[in-house]
Amino acid sequence: MKLDSSLYFITDSTTVSEDCFLSVVEGACKGGASLVQLREKNRSTREYMELAKATHQVTCRYNVPLIIDDRVDVALAIGAEGVHVGQTDMPVALARKLMGPGKIVGATTKTVPQALEAYEQGADYLGVGAIYPTTTKVVTILTSVDTLKDIVKAVPINVNAIGGLNKDNIHVLKGSGISGVCAVSAIMKAENPEQAARELKEAFINLC
């Protein structure tokens, strides 16, 4: 079955309470998120696991795969559907070996050589960006749309654009051939996360 990465929601729990956080995740799932990534940079392993379990309970209700950022151990411990690794994290090949063939492994790439390496090591999808400056606490380096297009042409797996994307600015991605968009703030900071997710997904579909 082909992976659906049309709307890839990446969480940021730093500005909301846990109860509110889980309601945002649920809203995103209701609004059409096809993948949810739990990204926690500053929690202890136990805290990360506890939040991952609670988040997984929500995503399972909507049959949306949960991807754990960085931490293969947390992904395995809570039975998540996948893991995502960056360029300074565990190599894709090792993540694939540990996760097994039936799980999703994603990778962040910014160049064609990085994309090819990740694909050859077993990645199921790539996150490419940042297309725009972001408001998250993750350090970002901008990636041009031309580079994004080159990566799409270079690999046969899903390529998603990431970085400051929302329904009003994704028009720059038209004709890029991407499989989907990743969103953090556009959903996390929305007054109505469900509506924000639905509108962003519709904007992407209209882009294709």
Image: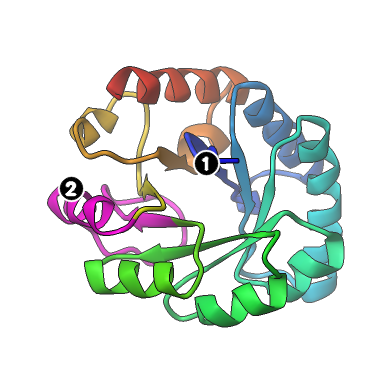
Cα–Cα gap, marks 1 and 2: 18 Å
Label 1: state its secondary structure. Answer: strand
Vertical order, 60 against 56 (above or below): above
Query: Do tag 1 and tag 2 residues touch (Cβ < 8 Å)?
Result: no
Q: What's the magenta region?
A: 126-155
Is 38 in front, or is 79?
A: 79
Q: Is residue 58 left or right of residue 112?
A: right
Vertical order, 128 against 169 (above or below): below
Q: Is residue 172 left or right of residue 50?
A: left
Q: Is residue 146 magenta?
A: yes
**Residue 34 falls in which quadrant of the image?**
top right
Image location (x, y in percent) of residue 94: 59, 82
Label 2: state its secondary structure. Answer: helix
Q: Is residue 40 left or right of residue 195?
A: right
Q: Amino acid at mark 2?
A: Val
Residue assigned mark 1: 8
**Residue 65 falls in which quadrant of the image?**
top right
Q: Is residue 142 left or right of residue 108?
A: left
Q: Amino acid at mark 1?
A: Tyr
Residue 145, label in figure = 2
